Amino acid sequence: MPQKLLTILCAALTFSAASFASSVSQEEYDAIAERIKPVGDVYLVGAEPVVAEPTGPRDGTAVYTMFCGACHGTGVSDAPIKGDADAWSPRIAQGMDVLTDHAINGFNAMPAKGACMDCSDDEIIAAIEHMIEGL
């Protein structure tokens, strides 16, 4: 008898769940899907999504923001801060060739290309120009 009662109870729950699912509107379904969606994706090696390659060179602002700003926005390891004329004056006095050489090849605590290994020399020069513009 208890087994029969359990079977009836399971059947009742199954059918009631099925009827509930069919009564959910599309808006409610979308809201539920939004709430339970994953926060990230996991990919196996070789199955990563294809990311579009840059269509052209990045401008100085983009390179500065992505790579240079962490140090040149805060002064880490005595990096001259963007817009600080006193810090940049002695460096600018050495000439653009020296600034470019230090930025591309690294200097003191600064790694080569500011750790932007996929930046072209022109993109690095654009970042330098962005940091010293208006001084």
Image (cartoon, rainbow, N blue to C red):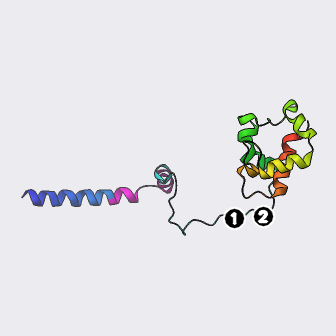
The magenta stretch is: 18-32
Residue nearest the observer in this picture, 85 or 38: 85
CA–CA distance in space, label 1 to label 2: 8 Å
Q: Is residue 93 above or below residue 56?
A: above
Measuring 87% from the left and 39% from the top, which residue is drawn there? 91
The residue that label 2 is drawn on is 55
Which residue, given by chain and number where applicable, does mark 1 sit on? Answer: 52
Judge by depth and name the residue closer to the eye, 88 or 22. Answer: 88
Name the secondary structure under disc 2. loop
Please name the amino acid that badge 1 sits on: Ala
Q: Secondary structure at mark 1?
A: loop
Quadrant assignment, res 83: top right
In the image, residue 73 sits, relative to residue 49, either above or below, namely above
Question: Which image quadrant is residue 71 in?
Answer: top right
Residue 29 colored magenta? yes
Report whether 31 appears left or right of 93: left
Residue 113 to residue 76: above or below: below
The amino acid beneath tag 2 is Thr
Task: Tell me, yes or no, whether the two marked residues, 1 and 2, touch with CB atoms within 8 Å.
Answer: yes
Relative image position of residue 75 (x, y in whole percent): 74, 34
- In the figure, is residue 25 to the left or right of 128? left
The reply, left or right, for residue 127 in relation to residue 46 is right
